[in-house]
Structure formats: C-alpha cells, structure tokens
Image (cartoon, helix red, strand yellow):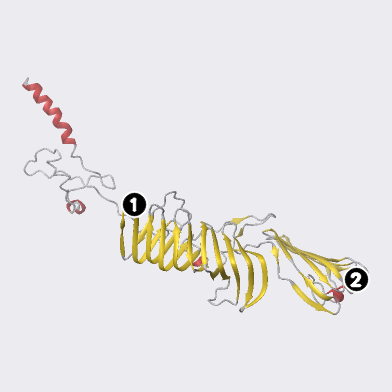
Amino acid sequence: MIPALLLAMALLWLPLTGMASPVLDDAGNTPSPSDPEVNDRKPSSAAGSAKDQGAGPQKNGDPEPPVSVIKLKTAPILEDNATNPAQGDQNPASFLRADKLSGQKDQFMDAQGHAELRRQGVVIEADHLHYDQPTDTVEATGNVRMIRNNTLLLESPHGFYQLGGQIGVMDSPHFSYRDPSTLLWKPPPASYVVPLPGSPIQRPPIWFMQGISREMDLTAGDKETLLNATFSTCKASTPDWFIRTPKLDLDHTLQEGDAHDGTLNFQGKPILYSPDLTFPLDNQRRSGLLSPIIGSSSTTGQDIAVPYYLNLAPNIDDTVTPRFMSTRGLQLGNEVRYLDPSVSGILSAEYLPHDSQLGTDRWFASWTHNQVLAPGLTFNANVQSASDPNYMNDLNTLIGPQGLVYLPRSLNLS
C-alpha cells in the first residue's frame, strides 16, 4: 500500500517540475542569469516565485534556476506614410494625437490643440477634432488642413469627413494638387509602349492646380465637386489667368475636370465662356478644341479657323482645322505628326473646293520626314506642293511655312 502511494506521488511531482521551463529569447537561447535584461526584470506577483511555480528545493551553493521572462519587442517608430494609398488594408488603423484627448470607449474621441488624425489615404489636422466611432466620421474645426491620397491639399475653417466611405464636405476651402516633389509617398512611374516599335515612354508628372471655392464635396475616394470655384494651373499666389465656374467636377480615375458654365479670365478680364469646359488633370494630351485663330486680310476677308486636336496614340496626333474665309469660302486643313525613337515627321494638307474668286479647287500638301535607317545612315525628306504658284500669296496657309517664294522638294540619304 505504501509503495503504491509513493509511486503515485512521484508521478504527480514530475509534471509540476516541468512547469518552470524558461522562455527562449529572440535568438532561441535560454536567458542567462547574468543577462542584465533578465536581472532588471523582476517577476510580477501574479506570476509568483520559482517555488510557487513548482521548482524543487534549492541546495546551498547551487545557482538559482533561470527565471521565466517575457520579452517584448520594441515597435518601430510610426513612419509618415499613413496616407499611402497603395497599402490595400481592408481594416486600416486610425491614429489620433493632440495636446488633450478625451472620450468614451467605442463612442467618440475629442482631440483639442494641435489635433491630428491619420488613416490610410488621409491626414486631417485642426485645432479641434471630434471623432464619432459608430459612424466613423470626424468633424474638424479651426485651421483645418487635410491631405488626401497624397495629392489633394485642403485648408478650410470647418469640415466633415467619413473615413470609411471617403466622403465629406469642406467649407470655403483653399485647395491645391501638389507637385510630386512634395508628396509623402511617390508612386512608381507608369510606362507604356508606343504602338510603333520603340522604347517605353515615361508618364509625365501630375499637373499642378490650385483654387478656392465656397464648398467642396468629397463624393468618393477619387472624385470631388466644388461649388462657386475659381481655379488655375498657375503656381503664383495671384495667377494671371484662372477659370471661374459655379460647379467643377474632378475625376482622378479618368484624370479629367469638367467646369460647368466656365469663364476663362485673364488678369481679371473674362475672355472666353463655355457651357461645358473639360480639361486634363495631368500632363497627358486630350482630344478637344484648340484656341481659335481669328483675323482678316485683303485676300481672304474675314478669316476664322477652329482647330480640333485628336490624340490618336502616345506618339501620333492629328489636328483637323476647318477655316472660313469670307471672300474665298470654306477650307479644310489636316496635320498628322508622328514620333518614334528612330522616326519623326509631319504630313499636312489643305483643300479649298471652288475658290469664290477664281472658281477653281485649290490645295497645298507638305511632308517632312527624318529617319535613322542604321548606325551612320539616315533618310530625310522635305516635299511641298501647291495647286498653283499664287496659293501662298492668296490664302496664307496655316500649316505651311510663311513667306515662301519657292516650294522645296528634296530627298536625302546620308
């Protein structure tokens, strides 16, 4: 009976002695008692002593058994990239700091004095921030400064922003789309290959734009609507030219702006009105109307031309120019430009059916071409032709060189 009882007690004692196994450090080694990090950390009362953990009695002169230590890794400093839109976290964290913070758990937070809230894609600074957690909405008051998607900078006295839906309203904002050199996060440059053989073409930087408005509605993560807005691409604080419109829509996915009932002003004077004025938000070319050419002469009478630009490809464009001359009639002009690392050229033509004064059809054509055929071997062409010798004097072509007394025709291989 007694041996069986002693055997049961021994079996019960063995698992208890294993409970005092030490925790490994970051390198996978057992901490040494001489390690200052171990000696500086005392086990808490909740953890108990080695004896409480089931360690056997110590003999005199024996070293103390290693103490179980939980080592916390130091978190890296929060980098200034909370607005990086490339981080596709479905549940991004929010960071709030200020001189004074108060609030109620799972309900709201109030930040007073130098308040700043960061969430993936947006940074909001203000004198006072009130964050409502159930609606994920922040109200900013006083010296509001907001950066969205690392391109849009807003300064406003007051505004609301719903962080999850990326929608909000800013009152009387001054806005600007900043230069790439000022961005906290720089996206990698996009590239594409031209249709004709050649090397990739780097996309130019983001187009700068600034202005003011009565109200800005942030309707989506990539769209804004401004009411009673005045904006310009000039970087000066008082730009020479600007566009004033009661409603301006900006779409950053399409990289396009749309000004409704817009008026172009130069040095405070309105010079052009358009019921629907569209323009690019970057330096990429867009198809559309160019500035009209208006004039008069003794040979053409009242003369007006309205060019229309067609962006056919990154390295090919076309400009179609209808032209009305009161004493000659309606003329149509066309100019195609092409560019490749080894080839470039311009092909243009004008056609005037039935000149009102001469009663004949008149035309002009031109082709300039430069091409590298092989290392040290190039081909150049400059060919121009007209329907009659007086074409240049009578019609003053819009696409050909002015004041020519002869039309060159040359092909060179060198």
The residue beneath circle 1 is: 106
Q: Measured along the vertical axis of the image, is residue 177 above or below residue 91?
A: below
Specify whether residue 397 is in view. Answer: yes
Q: Which mark is residue 324?
A: none
Quadrant of residue 123 within the rendered picture: bottom left
Label 1: which secondary element = loop
Q: Circle 2: is it few (<14), some (14-19), or many (20+) Cα within 10 Å?
A: some
Say whether disc 1 or disc 2 marks the residue closer to the N-terminus. 1
**Quarter of the figure with the N terminus:** top left
Describe residue 268's horizontal placement relative to residue 301 as left or right: left
- Give the Cα separation between the discs numbered 1 and 2: 82 Å
Q: Position of residue 55 (x, y in %)?
A: 13, 39
Q: Position of residue 120 (x, y in %)?
A: 44, 56
Residues 199 and 19: in front is: 19
Q: Residue at x 11, y 28 (%)?
A: 9
Tell me the kind of residue under disc 2: Ser
The residue beneath circle 2 is: 356
